[in-house]
Amino acid sequence: MFGFIKKGFSKTADVIKEILPEKVLKIDKETLEEILLESDVPYEIVKEMIYYLPPQETVKRADVQRVMKAYFIYKIEEITEQKPFVELVIGVNGAGKTTTIAKMANNYKKNGKKVMLGASDTFRAAAIEQLKRWADKLEIPIVCTQQDHDPSAVAYDTISSATAKGFDNVIIDTAGRLHNHTNLSNELKKIVRICNKAKEGAPHRKILVLDGTQGNSAINQAKSFNEIVGIDAIIITKLDGTAKGGALFGVARELKLPIIFVGVGESEDDLVPFNPDEFIDVILDTIFVSENG
C-alpha cells in the first residue's frame, strides 16, 4: 500500500527535492516553509505549522511529524449494518467522478460484495455512457436511462432494485454542473430526499470527489457542496499528476472531513485508502535522512 501512496505523491516529492537536493537530519524553518508552500500547503497552515514547532531555528523529523499529524484527526463513520449500503458520489465535471465510482465498485467487488451502480448524472449523455462502459468492463449491473431523465427516479430505482435483489452496495453518480447553481443545489437535495424514500437513512454516505491538480482552489468548491447536502467524506483524484499534494492539509483542516481514498492512476485498481501516516512519511522521507543511518 505504501508503494501506491508513494506513487501518488511522487511529483510532490520531486518539488521537495528541487528545494532540498540532499536529505538532512534537521531542517531550518525557512527551508521547511518554502517546501510546504511549494507543495501547495495553504499559507495560513504553513504559518500555523511553523508556530507550533519548537522555538529552535532547526527542527527534527519527529517535531514536524507531530505537527502534521494534527491536521488529520477526522475519521470516517462506518455504517456496515446497512444493506444495501448506499453512497452518493458528488463533484464537478472533470474531477474524475465517474472513474472514481468505477474504482470504488471494483474495490467492493474484489472484496466479495455485490455492487450496483446508478447513473443519476442525466445532465450529460457522455456521463451515462462512460459509467455504462465501466459497468460492462467490471461486469457490474447498472441502472440508467436517457439524458435529461429525472435523476432522482434513477436513484430510487437503483436502490429499490438493489434492495430487492440482496445487493451489498449501491453507488450513485450525480451531475457536476447544471444551468446554474440553484438548479444543481435543488437537484442534489431532491436526490438525497428520494434516496431516503427508497431506503430509510440512505444515502448512508455522501462522498465528494475533488481534483487533486486543483490544489487549494478545490476547497471553496468543496465548501459549496458541503453547504448544499452535507458531505461525509472526501476522495482526492489525479494525485499522481500533480505536485500539489500539500493541499490535502488544507482540505482536511478547512472541511473538517475525512479523506477516505486517493486516486493515483487511471486503472480500476488505482484507488487506495488514504493513510495520513503514510502520506506524511512520504513527505518526511524526502526531507530527512534516517536517524538510524
Image (cartoon, rainbow, N blue to C red):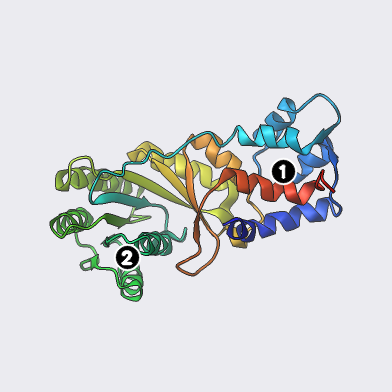
**Image label count:** 2
Which quarter of the picture shows residue 43?
A: top right
Residue 293 is situated, as x and y percent measured from the top left of the image, at 85, 49
The secondary structure type at the circle numbered 1 is: helix
Residue 59 appears anywhere in the view:
yes
Q: Amino acid at mark 2?
A: Arg
Q: CB under 8 Å between callouts 2 and 1?
A: no
1 or 22, nearer to the observer: 1
What residue is shown at x 86% (from left), y 30% (from top)? 57
> Alpha-carbon neighbours of circle 1 within 10 Å: few (<14), some, or many (≥20)?
some
Query: From the image, which quarter does the N terminus lie in?
Result: bottom right
Q: Amino acid at mark 1?
A: Leu
Reading the image, the residue beneath label 2 is 124
Whether residue 79 sits left or right of residue 293 in the image: it is: left
Which disc number belongs to residue 37? Answer: 1
**First along the sequence among labels 2 and 1:** 1
Select label 2 or label 1 by which is in front: 1
- Whether residue 39 is visible, yes or no, is no
The residue most toward the top is 55
Q: How far apart are the two marked residues, 2 and 1, measured between alpha carbons?
A: 37 Å
* Residue projecting furthest to the left: 164
Question: Residue visible at 58% across and 60% down?
Answer: 4
Mark 2 closeness class: few <14, some 14–19, many ≥20 residues within 10 Å: some
Q: Is 31 located above or below residue 214 in the figure?
A: above
Q: Which residue sits at x=72%, y=55%?
A: 13
- The picture places residue 59, in percent across and down from the top left corner, at 81, 33
Q: Position of residue 178 (x, y in %)?
A: 33, 55
